[in-house]
Amino acid sequence: VDLGAVQRQLDGQRQRLSLDLVLHIGAEICEALDHAQQVPGPDGQPMRLVHRDVTPSNVLVSKAGEIKLTDFGLAKRPEDGTSAGGLRGRFGYVSPEQASGQPVDARSDVFAVGLLVWELALGRRLYSGLADFDALRAVRETDAPHPRDHDPTLPIELDTILAEALARDPRKRLPNAGELGRRLRGLRYSLEDE
């Protein structure tokens, strides 16, 4: 089932996923994105693909807990630029640079995963619950609130990780999905040890 369907079901029941599962899903998405960055192209060099459409409907969850990232139809390499016709992807999950029509790289996907993790951890929408124009403006102009502002029982480390994933300035953001995935897994394992 896709993660969007899971979110809708949880919304209807006013429930949310366990933080352990949220961190697992986020880390697995990051692993898929990291692979897309590292997979060799025909020239033997890393493809450095940027997905550009990391959304709940593009994440599949199996009953066994396997996570798959799908729909690489909008994926591009940073040097390919953006295609004519403007913004691609679902507006509630684009990065500030994507929303502004600027060039994107791996940090844009980091932002999208940060949005997904934020929403799953809190069981509420951040930008995806807004109308398209409002979502684009919010992504470009506002900072995401810390998860602990909404749920003080969440670990402070999650605030730190998501602040770095959701920084509006890509230069202040975590550099790639591999790093975000390592941080999410590290938090997950530290919570298991408690």
Image (cartoon, grey):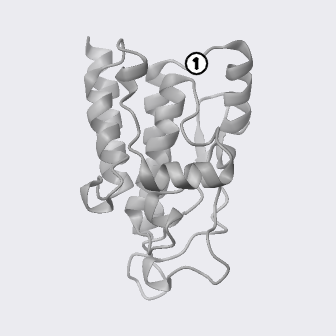
Q: What residue type is labelled 1?
A: Arg
Q: Which quadrant would residue 90 be assigned to in this image?
A: bottom right
Closer to us: 159 or 1: 159
Q: Residue at x 31, y 58 (%)?
A: 169
Residue located 56% across and 55% down the image: 136
Crowding near pointer 1: few (<14 within 10 Å), some, many (20+)? some
Residue 22 appears anywhere in the view? yes
Q: In this view, does 106 lie to the left or right of 171?
A: right
Evaluate whether residue 31 shows in this view. Answer: no
Q: Which of 26 and 10 is in front in this view?
A: 10
For numbered disc 1, what is the local secondary structure?
A: loop
Which x, y percent locates residue 149?
A: 37, 22
Residue 116, compared with residue 91, is above or below; it is above
Query: Residue 90, relative to residue 185: is it above or below?
Result: below
Name the outermost residue toward the bottom: 43
Percent position (x, y) of residue 43? 43, 88
Q: How far across and how far down the image is residue 129, in percent?
A: 65, 38
Q: Is residue 17 left or right of residue 187?
A: right
Q: Name the residue under label 1.
A: 16
